[in-house]
Amino acid sequence: MRPEHYFDYAASTPLDPRVFEAMRPWLTERFGNASSSHSWGRRAREVVEDARELVAELAGAEPEEIAFTSCATEANNWIIKAAEKVWFSPYEHACVRESAMAVGGQPLEVDGCTLLPPPEPGLVCVMTVCNETGAVIDVPDLPAGSKLHRDAVQSIGKLPLGTGGGDTATFSAHKMYGPQGVGAVYAVDGDFPSPLLHGGGQEPGGRSGTLNVAGIVGIGEACRIAAEEMEGDQEKAVACREALMEILCGAEGVGINDHTMNSPFILSVTVMGIQAGTLVVDLDLQGYAVSGGSACSSESSAPSKVLLALGLASNQATATIRVSFGRFSSVDASADLGRAILATAARLRG
Ligand code: PLP
């Protein structure tokens, strides 16, 4: 498997070797519970607080506004399940949509691709960047008394959107070259809701559970690198995306689902007449990793709710794959992928 043939960065990024090196001591000779008062524990606490500063700096926040979690799914569940009235955009990741629906939340109406304001105040969940298409999502006007929650998983470390202007925001390490299994919540002024996980109250807001010190060091280092390299990463993504689009644009039965504002890290491609799942498997056999919509829904053959909400017809939605780029992608491999998609489509259509 060739790493430059991995085009599923929106599902999970490779661990940056520099992040691994920062984590390594905390997986080997350094250990201890960051809540212990002896020197092993205090040393662990110190690196956790260093990481908190790095996450806060990248997000444009203060360290006391950041709490660590086990992933963005937990982070979103925490914020949403503590709210009384929840509204959510129809573009949200399943962990936002399902959390919201579990507490009786309702979807926002849309006019075309424009989100309409909710009829009543509440917690309004609007992601910064759609994980399926890369669309940058605009926030509607909110009624007085509302709070804005931004799932910033697909923008943190990639686009300079920080917390997206939210009262709360959520991040995930493994979408930005950090380890899987670490997330973070931002809450303005450190105003975290009541905890989802009760226990020792180790983190701000009372979020409980022994801290994943190595993982937290990893998200901190990932944020430090992202702050330095965001511009270069963006240029690389723009070049790769353009190389792929150049091959695909104009090809018969191939559509690019671009939006007014799109993240350069994601390209949504519809290959009419071919089920996304079939194309994903065929490309996999050729050594390319792409995905059919989001990784969490890739087992389902039903059309993606998000793609339908973005205006695709059902037969287009089921024929849509997601290509996502990152730090270790290459322009040449992106063009190769484009040629592979066209050749595969021609063969499968017979
Ligand atoms: N939100 C968005 C937009 C995502 O793309 C994902 C993962 O695909 C998540 C939340 C969930 O993140 P995690 O894997 O950290 O739970």
Image (tube, rainbow, N blue to C red):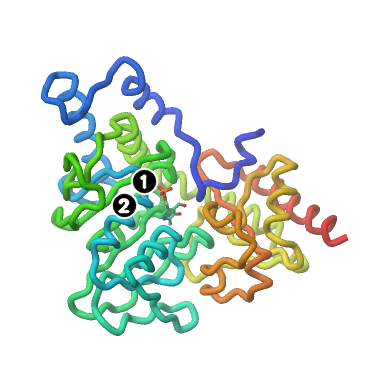
Instruction: Give the vertical position of 159 relative to 25 (above or below).
Output: below
Q: Residue sitting at 36 percent across and 65 percent down?
A: 102
- Residue 280 to residue 180: above or below: below
Residue that carries the numbered disc 1 in the rendered image: 71
SS at circle 1: loop
Name the residue furthest left. 37
Query: Quick check: 140 above or below 202?
Result: below
Q: Amino acid at mark 2?
A: Ala
Rendering coords of residue 242 (x, y %): 60, 56
At which x and y percent is residue 132? 53, 60
Q: Residue at x 75, y 51 (%)?
A: 339
Residue 108 point in image, percent of width and height:
39, 77
The quadrant of the picture occupied by the C terminus is bottom right
Q: Which residue is depicted at the point 76% across and 67% down?
A: 273
Q: Are marks 1 and 2 in contact (CB under 8 Å)?
A: yes
Q: Residue furthest right?
A: 350
* Residue on which the image places disc 2: 75
